[in-house]
Amino acid sequence: MKKNYLLGMALIASLSFNSCTKEIVYVQDGTGVESVADGAQIITLQVENGGDGLATRAGRPLYSAEAKQTIENVKLWICDNDGKVVYVKEISEWNDNKVSTVYTTGGHGRQTTIELTDADKLAAGTYKIYAVGYSNNSDYTLDAVTSVAKEGTFKENMVLPIKDGATNKIGEEIFAGQMGLTVEQGKGFKEPVVLNRQVAGAFAYVKDIPFMEGARYLKLMASAQNESLVLGNFNSFDLTGNGSGNGENVKYVVNGTSGKSDGDYAYVISTIDLNEWFTTIKDEDGDNLIDAGDNWKNPYSSIGEGHPTFQKGSAFGGEFVIPFAHVDGKQTLTLQLTNAGGDVLRSWKVNLGSSDEQLKQTITCWNNSEAKDWSTSLSGESSSTYSLVRNHLYGIGTRMNDEADPEQPGVDPDPDPEDPDDKPESLNNKQELVLKVNDNWEVIHGMELD
């Protein structure tokens, strides 16, 4: 997960990345004004690490809940009370050591410092600061981000559709946040800004896969899908602890729009091709499971040094997801075992644990009406019918790092002894799956299989 922090006029903008994380961009929650010598106005832009995934496309792939970042660009705006942009800063090649440096105080990620001088210095008054961290060649249509220039008008609640023709229709990691700022005559200040990850994440990490004639894919399916992301209603709090939750500071927000929900389990979140994980789909020992052992292979080993590792005999698939609201009466997620033609050979319901905190929440959603605002009217979350909310990671099984055992890089571990940080869910004799939500990532949800 990633966090980004902005300190402006001594403004700290921290982009934190959790998740999922894939990965949250944060600006710390300020505790007051800090005096700065000679009224200096300084912005320290910090991008904190978070999140990861599996895919070859724009943005970072999701392999685990590990804190990481791969964004290349950060754009910052300072606006007056009327929304007029009075200062703009664009940073490219963010991960270049000449542009940003590693930091470990209050988090871990990368940071750079910007000082407002001469004509850029802010006059006394109140302002709002916004920042967005995004990838090159993004699958989002970023016109709403890239077109806002100095002297222009900044509009909150930017809507970013997935591009026409993009192969990725699910979502891509992106960070954003805002902070209010008061400038006093002759005084400088240090106030933190937090940008959080704007998407959810979902993965399936499984083992003991049933053998069925013609089995080819494991697909994580959803009852709904959103195709545009809304940047707004940010959580400008400096979350700590990857997936540990921060009590009242955890937010439950669905910031997706342009949704589809016209059928049960109709939308694919991620697909595991079993031919990529097993040399042959067979059951020679007669235990009704796909043979593992020497028949298993890691499809990512060809990447080379630093490739993700997995428990031997397991399979993994995950993606960043534009958040969506639950559909009344519909099972939100299912895991399906299909043949090459898509026929379902077996399926498992994927449920939230009965004690999951999300089940107690009223979800804040983007309102698609003419008002174009946020509402908090969505309730009725249940173990089987639940929303996928912003900056929460929903996982079948437990996977905290890209490398199963970070102390043995490049080594795929044998299943014994079990590692609590790397524990695929067994599909043997299971009817339901349990998901977990992570938090640098705000929360890691553990899901159950039925």
Image (cartoon, rainbow, N blue to C red):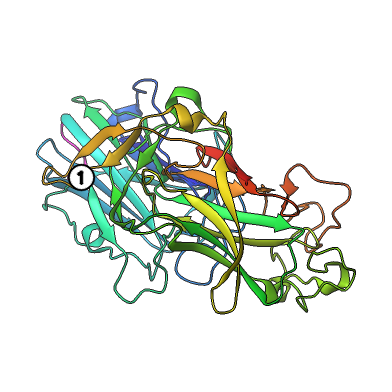
Residue 173 on image: x %, y %: 44, 56
The quadrant holding residue 38 is: top left
Determine whether, in the image, residue 242 is placed left or right of residue 387.
right
Instruction: Give the labeled residue for mark 1.
Output: 156
In the orientation shown, which residue stands out farthest toward the top? 32
- The residue lying toward the viewer, choosing from 373 and 72, is 373
Q: Residue at x 45, y 31 (%)?
A: 250
Which one is in front, 310 or 93?
310
Q: Is residue 121 magenta?
A: yes
Taking the spot 14% from the left edge, 38% from the top edge, the residue there is: 80
Decide if residue 90 is in sight here. Answer: yes
**Image: 94 above or below 79:** below
Query: Left or right: where does residue 44 sit relative to residue 88?
Result: right
Q: Is residue 130 above or below residue 145?
A: above
Foreground residue, 181 or 146?
Answer: 146
Q: Residues within 10 Å of mark 1 (few under 14, many from 20)?
A: few
Residue numbers of the magenta segment: 118-123
Residue 288 in the figure: left or right of residue 49? right
The answer to whether residue 91 is magenta is no
